[in-house]
Image (cartoon, grey):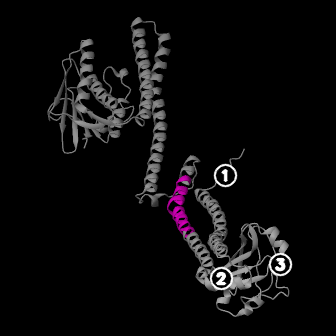
Amino acid sequence: MTQKKTASILKKFLLFNLVVFSVLGLITIIYLNAIQPNLVKKRSLNHIEIIINTTDHINRLNINFNQSGIKKFLLSTRFLFQSLDRVQFYNIAGEIIGDTNILDLDQNVFSKTDLVLEESMDGISLKKTKDKNNLRLNDFKNKKIIKNSIIKNNLNAPLVLENKINNNFLISTLQKIYNKEKLIGFIKVTEEANDILIAVEERKNFIIRTVLAVALVILIFSLFLNKYILKPIGFLVSFTESIKNKSDKKINIDKFFVREDEVGILTKSIDEMTKELQKRTNRAETFSTDLAHEIRNPLASLKGASELLDKSSSNIDRDKLFKIINHDVERIERLITDYSQMLKDEASLSREKMKKIDIVSIIKNVVDDFRQDIFNQNKKIEINVKNKNGKINYILGIENRLEQVVANLLDNAISFSDDNGKIDIEINEITKSYILLIKDEGPGFSEASTQKIFKRFYSNRPKNFGKHSGLGLNIVKNIIELHKGTISASNRPESKGAQIEVLLPKLT
């Protein structure tokens, strides 16, 4: 079953923005389509208030709802319609009987008629007539615009009309007029509303500019995201994949090391982790080879002794052969045990956290345990601890690992010491480090280069050789280096014996 290829982060990011843009675009279209009707509705509500006030005045003044009565009414109350472009009155038959144009025009205005209905907001649709004389329409012979039956049956609510004449946007509201609950006619209020078109256009332009600006910002951000984040991550993914697949293709990630941001830190971490894993792999391979080599010698000795054991008739020779066999078995057991422990220690070292500890306290605790062991074994070896700076010496470290260091170094010093010997442990400090010196009175080092004692499976064999695998000092060196310290060995300059010097950085 083939694994489904996943989309890149950039594609997901762009797809997400496309979905968001689509949703916002749909909402924007709905909003823009609703702007003009809402503004028209608000303007119509103002018309309805004017119509209600006009109806109240007509009823209160007992105005006759005919041409002469409406003409007098308009001349006497022109202030009511100062903010409007036109107000027209119609009788029940749909004939025009009054028009605010009489305030500026002659009586011939009544010989012309206007379009009352073009398209209604509530679904009423009537035949349109063409505009031939700007604000005037064709003169119907019977002077009727709407049949009486249509108006009575359909105009149950105020009717809002929208017209465009000579690039002017006009809003008209048509409503019935009642006198004592009796229908006496109709009134139509017309007002120029070009400001509504301007407002709608401004909103459209603002939204378009905003969308373009946001799209530009997202485009720039996407390019930045791809160049400075996604491409480097892609390189790192290819780098790790090539290592996993053991590819011969080399992927260079050095150019990301100079970056001080998260990508640079991630690159350095991956590089360090890769090198550490490679180092551990090489170390494991070398350990296995060295262990096989070290085991081969005692196995050969063990095989030879066992073959001679069958041929030997002397009890003295048999005892010697049994001692050799026992010695070789102990050697093999020690090698396997220490090797296994070393692998466990290396695995656990990577998981343990360092904390603030007092190195002098650790040394004294380990020394107390060794003194008790020496007493129990009836040995006469003296161990002295000298803290030359006379204060607490704090470092950042792993307590049980440093205890292991001190224990291994003490055990090594004791193995080379004779009865009535003395081991001195001195703690001193320099500018940025603490110095730990472990001195014994043994034979010292015969090696020309003393640093070789820290190599694995190296052993300057003491008498009780079977108890030492040659891994102890190598483990000590690894732990010290984990604590950013150093370790060295030398012969004591002032007297017989050897000394181990450990430098551990101070806690700052």
Q: Taking 257 as reference, is 200 left or right?
A: right
Residue 493 in picture, x, y percent from top left? 16, 35
Task: For marks 1 and 3, give the one nearer the viewer.
Answer: 3
Give the label on residue 73, or none. Answer: 2
* Sooner in the amino-acid sequence: mark 1 or mark 3: 1
**Three-letter amino acid code of the residue under disc 1:** Lys
Q: Is residue 215 magenta?
A: yes
Q: Quadrant of residue 75?
A: bottom right
* Sooner in the amino-acid sequence: mark 2 or mark 1: 1
Q: Are marks 2 and 1 in contact (CB under 8 Å)?
A: no
Q: Judge whether 415 appears above or below 25 on screen.
A: above
**Three-letter amino acid code of the residue under disc 3:** Lys
Name which residue lies at 44% across and 16% down.
325
Residue numbers of the magenta segment: 214-237
Task: For marks 3 and 2, give the one nearer the viewer.
Answer: 2
Q: Taking 478 as reference, is 380 left or right?
A: left
Give the label on residue 127, or none. Answer: 3
Residue 265 in picture, x, y percent from top left? 43, 53
Name which residue lies at 35% across and 22% down.
465
Which residue matches tag 1?
5
Q: Is residue 369 magenta?
A: no
Residue 468 in picture, x, y percent from top left? 36, 24
Report the front residue among 312 and 364.
364
Label 3, label 2: how far apart the Cα atoms are: 32 Å
* Sooner in the amino-acid sequence: mark 3 or mark 2: 2
How packed mark 3 is, by other alpha carbons closer than 10 Å (few <14, some 14-19, many 20 or more), is: few
Label 2, label 1: how far apart the Cα atoms are: 82 Å
Q: Name the quadrant of the C terminus.
A: top left
Report the front residue among 170 and 260.
170
